[in-house]
Image (spheres, grey):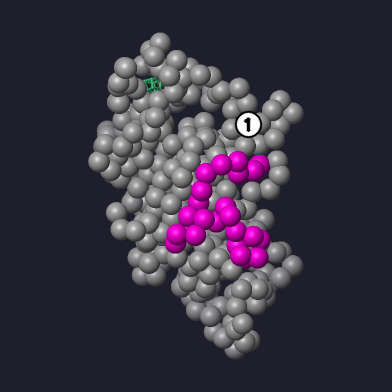
Amino acid sequence: MSTPILEVRDLRVEYTTPAGPAQAVSGVSFDLAPGEFLAIVGESGCGKSTMLFSIAQLLTYPAQTVGGSVKFDGVDLTTLSAEELRQHRWRDISVVMQSAMNALNPTLSIAAQLADACRAHTDWDDEKIARRSAEVLDMVSIDVAHLKSFPFQLSGGMRQRAMIAMALLLEPKLIIMDEPTSALDVVAQRSLMRQVENLRRSLGFAVLFVTHDMSVVSHFSDRLAVMYAGEIVELGATREVFDHPRHPYSNGLMDAFPSIVGEKRELTGIAGNPPSLVNPPGGCLFAPRCHFATDECREFRPELISVEEHAVRCHLVNPRVRS
Ligand code: SF4
């Protein structure tokens, strides 16, 4: 891999709860190359969105980052002041939220919201702001006439594309996307994903993309990280993880969604529920739901071990070396 643009090491996030701290993200580490598309998948509550917000330094109480580092272009974002972070936001890293209707201001036109972002992060004059606003709207295939529109006058798909236009304003090197397609129908999802992919290829930004829908990212991401109970349990090239999932949880996820090619098959879910993150069990966190669990699995927590470019956290795949 070329020099990573993002290096996440041993990232840990806790939520304060009446029952004690809940370990929402436990020791997550990965690299992201310039221009790469890394998808993070996993069921609701597995910590994927919390991890994204921690990387973007956007967590608020009761969540807090309690350990690890997030290096962007060699700078550890976890050590920066609010003002220093402001310098990086939009210019270097931008975030597209899950629901555009919540993220966009309903009382301002799209032009006014694009201008606000420009004024907060650049010294551009009105003419340059107007030119750039029209450019980014055109990039996401929204007619520039909609600069005058208010969010409620746009369709769901157009609102999400307007959010992506805002994210592109200052040509960031990394765009973080938190389930941007979850409120869209399947046709709008596919159209948005194609648009993101074309823009990534032409502009060269990297994408960190969170979703619980495996089919959304299957054709668009370079690599896939599967999260379970706050940990990455498998990380590898997307095609490889889809075609040969090695962790029993990844395998279960693959069996839980339909394919539009190949034979029709019965879909199976994964029985049981994720463990408590306040009092997580010892050993492998997936053991209570895993058909292959052994006494060793219930006693010893597996490490995420890489063989070449593929990393898996499972004793079955990486047998423990007994001392
Ligand atoms: Fe299943 Fe054991 Fe692997 Fe955990 S370590 S996923 S319990 S086989």
Q: Count residues near mark 1 (Cα–Cα under 10 Å), then give few for <14, some for 14-19, many for 20+.
A: some
Question: Which amino acid, by three-letter code, is at mark 1?
Answer: Ala
The residue under label 1 is 22
- Residue 314 is left or right of residue 84, and the answer is left
In the image, is residue 247 above or below residue 34?
above
Residue beneath the point at 61% across and 65% down: 84
Whether residue 197 appears in this view of the structure is no
Residue 119 place in picture, x, y as percent: 65, 77
Seen from the viewer's position, the closer of residues 177 and 270 is 177
Q: Helix, strand or loop at disc 1?
A: strand
In the image, is residue 302 above or below residue 208?
above
Query: Is-magenta flag for residue 83?
Result: yes
Residue 186 place in picture, x, y as percent: 46, 49
In the rendered image, the quadrant that contains the N terminus is bottom left
- Residue 109 is left or right of residue 92, and the answer is right
Q: Which residues are magenta?
A: 63-86
